[in-house]
Image (cartoon, helix red, strand yellow):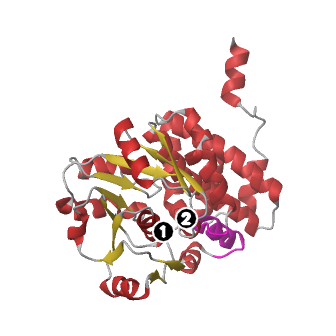
Amino acid sequence: MPKIAVYGAGSWGSALAVLLAKAGHQVALVGRHADEMENMRNQHENKRYLPGVVLPQGLFPTTDLSFLNADLVVLSVPSHSVREAACLINPYLRRGCIVVNTAKGMEEGTHLRLSEVLVEELPNNPVAVLSGPSHAEEVGRDMPTTVVVASDVETAKTVQDMMMTPKFRVYTNPDVIGVELGGALKNVIALCTGIAEGLGFGDNTKAALMTRGLAEIARLGVALGGNPLTFAGLSGVGDLIVTCTSLHSRNRRAGVALGQGKPLETVLKEVGMVVEGVRATRIAHFLGIEKNIPMPITEQAYKVLFENADPKIAVADLMLRGKRHELEEVVEMSWLR
């Protein structure tokens, strides 16, 4: 049986380790805190991050980095920790071992996609990206889930074969850029739909934000090299829907609290886990300016998060923008012919 290591023992890393162990693989779940990993070994449960899910036989929680000498390594850390984690695990990786990144975000400062960070730090290892509508709480409980893995054809198919189960369907996609950007940018829109909910607005408002938010994601994503069709897939509209509507979504929960008037610092403490949409908003805002891409929803989210703008005024500013075509690029190209 192939040996697999999952680095990062949070909710998503634990859920994927459970999934892979149930699929018959030998899986090491490598975490940082010895006491937490010992508790998992003794209690067969990650009570802090994935309560109620039994850790099956074949899954070994450990802090021993030598277990990263595996056939496949799944990297499950927050986006801001990816480079640091890559540097840490690099000496232990087998040459040619595939590294699957599950974080959804971009690197602040460089604005690099996370696969680009991994290619810099792990030049001897093929890199794949796992994305799509997939909450850890549901994957850990064997609820049917579909995801997408993006990489070169051979690497993507290898990951697909190793991770796919009757309850976890894995598609492949060669568009690494589009898959990564869809997964990162949907968190911005999820924050905004949460803010709308916190303000007391209804389904009409949330549907509008999701639909027009998808247009912004695709507009920027295509400008950065993504395939427009990718944003209609699992890592685009699929992940957008689940993150904007699910009770499991940290970004949505954070947005609700912001809409209710709580300051950002308080909100982040209450959520207790990383809210990727906050960093993603800052990065997307500056990328939109750099590429001259109109991103009105992202712009208002930036003002609310970092300039203390009133969320109600932000919504009003969006509603009072000048008249537009819905499919602006398509309409303008058609009328110019």
Q: Distance of mark 2 from mark 1, alpha carbons?
A: 6 Å
Q: Is residue 255 magenta?
A: yes
Name the quadrant containing residue 242. bottom right
- Amino acid type for the residue under numbered disc 1: Ala
Secondary element under disc 2, as helix, strand or loop, is: helix
Pick the residue in front: 98 or 280: 98
Q: Is residue 23 left or right of residue 240?
A: left
- With 196 as the anchor, is 151 left or right in this view? left
Q: Give the residue number, with chain letter if any, for mark 1.
A: 15
Q: Secondary structure at mark 1?
A: helix
Which residue is at the front of the view, 43 or 245? Answer: 43
Q: Amino acid at mark 2?
A: Val
Q: Which residue is at the front of the view, 54 or 183?
A: 54
Percent coordinates x, y for residue 174 in the rendering: 44, 36
For the magenta stretch, what is the residue range?
247-262
What residue lies at 45% left-to-right and 40% top-to-bottom? 177
Estimate how packed mark 1 is, as few (under 14), some (14 to 19) or many (20 or more) residues with alpha carbons within 10 Å.
Answer: many
Residue 309 in the image, given as x and y percentages of width and height? 65, 63
Q: Is residue 278 magenta-colored?
A: no
**Do residues under tags 2 and 1 come within 8 Å of each other at their CB atoms?**
yes
Could you say which disc has been placed on residue 139 in the image?
2
* Residue lying at 41% horizontally and 67% vertically, measured from the top left: 21
Residue 265 visible in image = yes
Position of residue 144 relative to residue 331, above or below, is below
Whether residue 285 is visible, yes or no, is no
Residue 172, percent across and down? Answer: 47, 41
Query: Compared with residue 259, is residue 299 higher up or lower down, i.e. above or below?
Result: above
Q: Residues within 10 Å of mark 2 (few under 14, many from 20)?
A: many
Which residue in the rendered view is the most extreme toward the top?
A: 337
